[in-house]
Image (cartoon, helix red, strand yellow):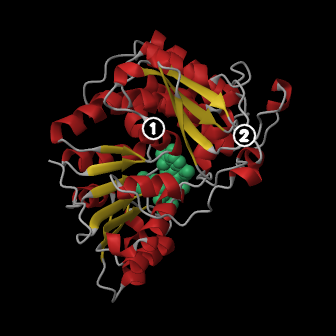
């Protein structure tokens, strides 16, 4: 049952998974900007113990949890005398996700976010979803869990928040297309040959958004757009061929819905995650966010261009996975996580990221690993296969 409260008197009880990350920190900023509207139940982080402790004090959280069991003593010391409960380890993360709350912000990066988010969803808690893997790796399994408990799902990603804000849920048959915008990343104007020598430092500099390292690299390869198209497929009532993406370098139009009458509705704003986060945290009401106001006259112009799918094969790769169905997106996501980590460790070249993902998918097809996902075990199995196969292929590329 969905327990979300929304009266002006009752503060919304909030848990933040991945509190110490980029989305987590922005969420805390919105919460502290609207102090009377929220009561923080639990904050979950992993390695950044000092920030976790600082955040827990700042928002007077009931509980602070690190996923890293070896750091419990450190967290305890930092929070001694504050009255804030502390815990550590994977089981403690799940417990935190299951504590009674009105909303859980799912902002742990990667597949590690899947189990705690599913645990919160199973309780019927509203999920404000930033973590992509819940839908990309486990779309059907995750949606079934939400359906079973009646938990509501609110998108946090700026593109999906934009679509959510302009989508007429009552007339899905009148939707022509959902069009996600992509900044095009830092290498949009590079020639294909120039992409070969991109270094991790270059890939970690996003022109418009400030984000965690994994998603920043994904934005540069446009894999992030591909992952978002997969998420959109699960979030909205459209088929894969109604999904499209367009380059919009200014990142002001966050996405659009085109209707069959020719209208195209877009949501705009400064490229700042605090706006979509505030939309999710306050839903169904709007609440203020500490962001710069959009000044269109100062901007002068907004431009759009088609994605060069030869230079950036990740978008087609992701749409192809939707066509393959079943575990294809799970394997693809796992291979991409490995490929990005190998690139950041200088073990795989920049162009090798999508090549490695493609090679892993082809191997999965050959090995009979593209199959229907019926349970979390199926998801874990496909995820593990993708990781092991991509690691094996990465090693063979190096030798
Ligand atoms: N950043 C954005 O603007 C943005 C936009 C849309 C969607 N997203 C999605 O939101 C998610 C978070 O992105 P991000 O950019 O905020 O990532 P990030 O800055 O790397 O932060 C990741 C968070 O997850 C925590 N974490 C990592 N491994 C964990 C584990 N095993 N157990 C528990 N916590 C763990 C980290 O803790 P420590 O830092 O303490 O180690 C940190 O709090 C990703 O799925 C991303 O694709 C991000």
Q: Furthest-top residue in view? A: 366
Q: Label 1: how many residues lie within 10 Å, few (<14), some (14-19) or many (20+)?
A: some
As drawn, the residue found furthest toward the left would be: 1
Secondary structure of the residue carrying tag 2 is loop
Tell whether circle 1 marks a residue whose Cβ is less than 8 angstroms from ligand 1.
no
Where residue 163 sits in the image (x, y, percent)? 47, 37
Label 2 crowding class (10 Å Cα cut-off): few <14, some 14-19, many 20+? Answer: few
Residue 278 seen in this snapshot = yes
Query: Which of 293/51 is in front?
Result: 293
Q: Which mark is residue 166?
A: 1
Is there CB contact under 8 Å for labels 2 and 1?
Answer: no
Is 292 on the left or on the right of 29, as rendered?
Answer: right
Of residues 258 and 126, the one nearer the viewer is: 258
Q: Residue furthest bottom?
A: 81
Compared with 371, 23 (above or below) is below
Tell me the tag on residue 352.
none
Chain-order first, disc 2 or disc 1: 1
Residue with the mark numbered 2: 302
The residue drawn where x is 62% and y is 60% is 293
Left/right placement of residue 29 relative to residue 272 reads left
Residue 64 horizontal/vertical position (percent)? 35, 70
Q: Secondary structure at mark 1?
A: helix
Vertical position of residue 159 compared to residue 37: above or below: above
Toward which corner of the image does residue 86 lie, by quadrant? bottom left
Q: Is residue 132 visible?
A: no
Q: Residue at x 41, y 71 (%)?
A: 34
Determine whether 148 is above or below 127 in the image: above
Does 65 sit left or right of 200 as displayed? Answer: left
């Amino acid at each position: 049952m969905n327990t979300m409260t929304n009266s002006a008197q009752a503060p919304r009880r909030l848990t933040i998974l991945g509190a110490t990350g980029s989305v987590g920190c922005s969420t805390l900023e919105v919460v502290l900007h609207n102090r009377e509207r929220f009561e923080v139940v639990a904050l979950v982080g992993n390695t950044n113990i000092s920030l976790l402790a600082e955040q827990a004090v700042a928002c007077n959280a009931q509980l602070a949890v690190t996923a890293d069991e070896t750091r419990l003593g450190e967290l305890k010391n930092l929070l001694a005398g504050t009255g804030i409960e502390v815990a550590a380890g994977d089981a403690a993360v799940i417990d935190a996700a299951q504590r009674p709350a009105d909303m859980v912000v799912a902002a742990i990066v990667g597949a590690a976010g899947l189990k705690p988010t599913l645990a919160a969803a199973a309780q019927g808690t509203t999920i404000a979803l930033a973590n992509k893997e819940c839908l990309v790796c486990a779309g059907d399994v995750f949606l079934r869990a939400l359906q079973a408990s009646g938990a509501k799902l609110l998108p946090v990603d700026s593109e999906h928040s934009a679509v959510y804000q302009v989508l007429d849920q009552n007339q899905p048959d009148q939707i022509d297309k959902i069009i996600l915008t992509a900044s095009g990343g830092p290498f949009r104007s590079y020639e294909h040959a120039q992409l070969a020598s991109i270094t991790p430092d270059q890939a970690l500099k996003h022109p418009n958004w400030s984000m965690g390292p994994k998603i920043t690299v994904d934005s540069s390869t446009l894999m992030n757009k591909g992952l978002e198209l997969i998420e959109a497929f699960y979030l909205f009532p459209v088929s894969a061929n109604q999904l499209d993406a367009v380059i919009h370098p200014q990142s002001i139009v966050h996405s659009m819905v085109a209707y069959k009458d020719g209208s195209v509705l877009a949501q705009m704003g400064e490229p700042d995650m605090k706006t979509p986060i505030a939309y999710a945290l306050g839903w169904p009401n709007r609440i203020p966010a500490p962001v710069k106001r959009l000044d269109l006259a100062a901007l002068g112009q907004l431009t759009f261009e088609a994605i060069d799918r030869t230079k950036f094969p990740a978008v087609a790769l992701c749409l192809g996975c939707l066509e393959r169905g079943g575990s294809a997106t799970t394997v693809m996501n796992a291979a991409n996580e490995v490929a990005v980590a190998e690139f950041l460790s200088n073990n795989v070249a920049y162009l090798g990221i999508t090549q490695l993902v493609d090679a892993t998918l082809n191997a999965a097809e050959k090995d009979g690993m593209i199959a229907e996902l019926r349970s979390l075990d199926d998801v874990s199995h496909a995820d593990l296969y993708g990781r092991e196969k991509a690691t094996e292929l990465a090693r063979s590329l190096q030798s």
